[in-house]
Image: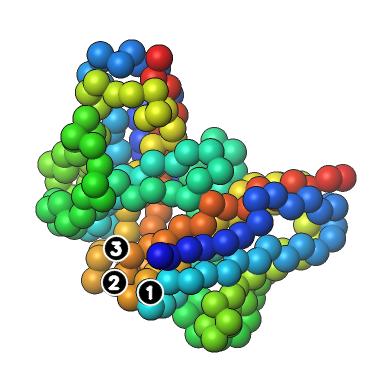
């Protein structure tokens, strides 16, 4: 079967750095998405990786290793507004999006 | 503002009621999706429409009935729901199924509670 694993919950301190991991086992791979979802709001697109390596976008970076079936989202200089759930999703060989259950990130002052 | 608007935001209904969820996108996208989001579970894809034609139905019970009159509007008609159907229902749109690496844009969802 197809599976996406990410931690259920993480806690970090304002101003610090946090890394949210995502591992996947899917039938084929056509890219990996990260979304941010604040409580009661829409998931919003953060990043898309299809090639190995690190993509940086301001305070957020996303890394992919296809050979390891692994990605992470790195958040720097954490702010209170970064408290949200972070969803990992993989496009399989049929271009179906396989979703993880999300990681709830709690930022403490 | 994501460009995808869902109404109502909250809905409480009895198991014998009939209600409809509405989704409208202002992004000029061709594909629209219904998802179910339950606490601590992955998003469950329910239905996919591409250019108003339904392309996927992921074994969804018939008490959920989608309707897509045009590329900008999507409805989910609800009838005789069960308590386990209580969840957040999210609508999304994207540029097209041919370019599946295009991100989906989501609405804020309808929080549905079945009494």
Q: Disc 2: which chain?
A: A
Which residue position is annotated with label 1?
A27
Mark 3 secondary-structure assignment:
loop
| Residue B11 coordinates in the image, percent (x, y) | 39, 21
User: How dense is the environment of label 2, judged by Cα within 10 Å: few (below 14), some, or many (20 and up)?
Assistant: few
- CA neighbours of label 1 inside 10 A, class few (<14), some (14 to 19), many (20+): some
Where does label 2 land, which residue?
A94
Residue A52 appears at what percent x and percent y?
55, 86
The answer to whether residue A80 is seen in the rendering is yes
Secondary structure of the residue carrying numbered label 1: loop
Quarter-of-image position of residue A69: bottom right
Chain of the residue displaying label 3: B
Determine the secondary structure under disc 2. Answer: loop
The residue at the point 59 percent across, 43 percent down is: A38
Q: Is residue B14 above or below residue B74?
A: above
The quadrant holding residue B100 is: bottom left
Pair 3/1: label in front: 1
């Amino acid at each position: 079967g197809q599976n996406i694993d990410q931690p259920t919950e993480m806690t970090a301190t304002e101003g610090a750095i946090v890394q949210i991991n995502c591992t996947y086992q899917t039938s084929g791979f056509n890219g990996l998405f990260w979304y941010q979802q604040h409580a009661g709001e829409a998931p919003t697109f953060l990043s898309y990786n299809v090639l190995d390596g690190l993509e940086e976008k301001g305070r957020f970076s996303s890394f992919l290793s296809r050979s390891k079936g692994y990605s992470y989202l790195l958040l720097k200089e954490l702010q209170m507004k970064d408290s949200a759930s972070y969803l990992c999703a993989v496009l399989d060989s049929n271009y179906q999006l396989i979703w993880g259950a999300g990681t709830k990130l709690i930022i403490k002052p | 503002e994501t460009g995808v608007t869902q109404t109502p935001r909250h809905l409480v209904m009895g198991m014998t009621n009939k209600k409809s969820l509405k989704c409208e996108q202002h992004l000029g996208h061709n594909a629209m999706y219904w998802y179910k989001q339950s606490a601590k579970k992955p998003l469950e894809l329910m239905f996919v429409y591409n250019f108003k034609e339904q392309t996927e139905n992921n074994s969804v019970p018939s008490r959920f009935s989608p309707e897509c009159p045009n590329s900008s509007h999507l409805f989910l008609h609800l009838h005789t729901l069960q308590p386990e159907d209580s969840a957040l229902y999210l609508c999304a749109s994207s540029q097209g199924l041919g370019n599946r690496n295009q991100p989906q844009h989501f609405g804020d969802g309808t929080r549905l509670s079945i009494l």
